[in-house]
Image: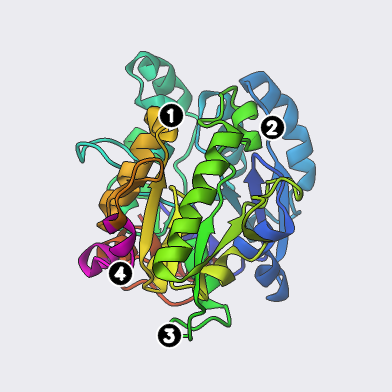
Amino acid sequence: MQSAMSDSKSTIKNFIFLVQYPWSERDWQRFGGNAMKSAGLDVRVLLCEFKSREQCQSWLPDFEKALPQNLHDLVVIVNFNMTECSIPLFQFFSQRNIIFGFLKNASQPNSGTGNELPRIYSQLFYNLKRFRSFLQRMYKKVKPASFIVIDGVALLTHAHTLCTPASKSKTKIIKSHSLDYESFRTSFYPKNSIRSGRAIFIDQFLEGHPDFSLNGTIPPCDPFSYELSLENFFSEIEKTLALEVVVAIHPKRPIRSHFAGSKCIQGETLQLIADSKLVLGHYSTALGMAVIHNLPVMILGTTELMKSKFVNKALSSYATALGVVIVDIDQYCNSDIQNALKINETCFRSYFDKHIKFPGSPNLPWWKILLDELAKNTTD
């Protein structure tokens, strides 16, 4: 029996991305949508805001209208996990024999026992035993994903948790790289470019990011005390290391809600990192750009931030992965700053392989790697 992969050959002309948040122009660039269009592919992005199976079922007629006439030319990229409420969507894929898969190329370090699933998979409902009988019925109507695109070896062990339990071997693992690496690969900022005398702080808008309200959670820090702590620490960095601290403002931070005492630039995070001598941050995936450019990293926390279990775990995960310590900027030692320019080469190499680029993967855009794999006529 042939798989959906083998039916695709090299005829793919249409891509549909299913997302839970609208794409900005930055997303079109990062995910390769603009480059795909330039290559002659038809690319559409559809918003999936359903919160229940009933809402998903009601949304499907609109989705069907967006499909091209020839479904053999189509690949659907799903940017969210398979959950109970999205089951009708995946059943629809099976009924129409649509080629679909998951894009998981933004992996993050995960602290734990080693047997713990990465955070992005921890909410997959079929891992809960109480849903087992329900899933056995539902999965009989759902074919496995044709592929999963991953960015490094950290996801290799757990990639198949996105497939139906009985059909793991039918899903192709596409070994690729992170979206940030793709930005580096196509940028004009070479790895050994001349650095400016600056340190870059990667803003995550932790005191007011809109995702907190959307998820019904409270931001982990008070805006005034958080920004005051950072401003004081930036002053010490500038005094001790003679590096100007520039804040790479998060794209969702309001344009006038900036750090009053620092130079702030929005929309140029990757370029700023490439041109710096030191990268400061919390747990942003953009820290991977520091690894790509072999730049020293400081993982910053505050006494208030580290009271949050989630933030504390995220900081610890990044610090461990990068071979550095968490610097509590409310109570730090001068040696924390004096040692800031050191790099743990072993940890950086490991981080690169685990979270940035799968060893030996082609130096091509992720979507070209995917198309090449779809064209291989793989059989079960």
Instruction: Report the amino acid beneath label 4.
Output: Pro
Please report whichever mark, 2 or 1, sits nearer to the chain's N-terminal start: 2
Q: Are marks 4 and 2 in contact (CB under 8 Å)?
A: no
Circle 1 SS class: loop
Is residue 188 visible in the rendered image? The answer is yes
Instruction: Find residue 248 and report its horizontal and vertical position in percent.
Output: 59, 59
Judge by depth and name the residue closer to the eye, 154 or 272. 272
* Marking on residue 49: 2
In the rendering, at what x and y percent does residue 138 appear? 47, 24
Residue 309 against residue 109 in the figure, above or below: above
Nearer to the camera, 138 or 128: 128
Q: Nearer the viewer, mark 3 or mark 4?
A: 3
What secondary structure is marked by label 4?
loop
Residue bearing mark 4: 359
Q: Which residue is mark 1?
A: 123
Say which quarter of the image contains residue 86: top right
State the residue at coordinates (66%, 57%). Answer: 27
Residue 303 quadrant: top left
- Sequence-first tag of 3 and 4: 3
- Is the Cβ of the residue at disc 1 closer than 8 Å to that at disc 4? no
Residue depth check, mark 3 versus mark 1: number of the one nearer the observer: 3
Q: Residue at x 74, y 49 (%)?
A: 67
Q: Earlier in the sequence, mark 1 or mark 4?
A: 1
Residue 102, can we see it?
A: no
State the separation of the CA atoms marked 3 and 1.
Answer: 40 Å
Q: Residue at x 72, y 75 (%)?
A: 38
Write the start and end of the magenta stretch as one range.
335-349
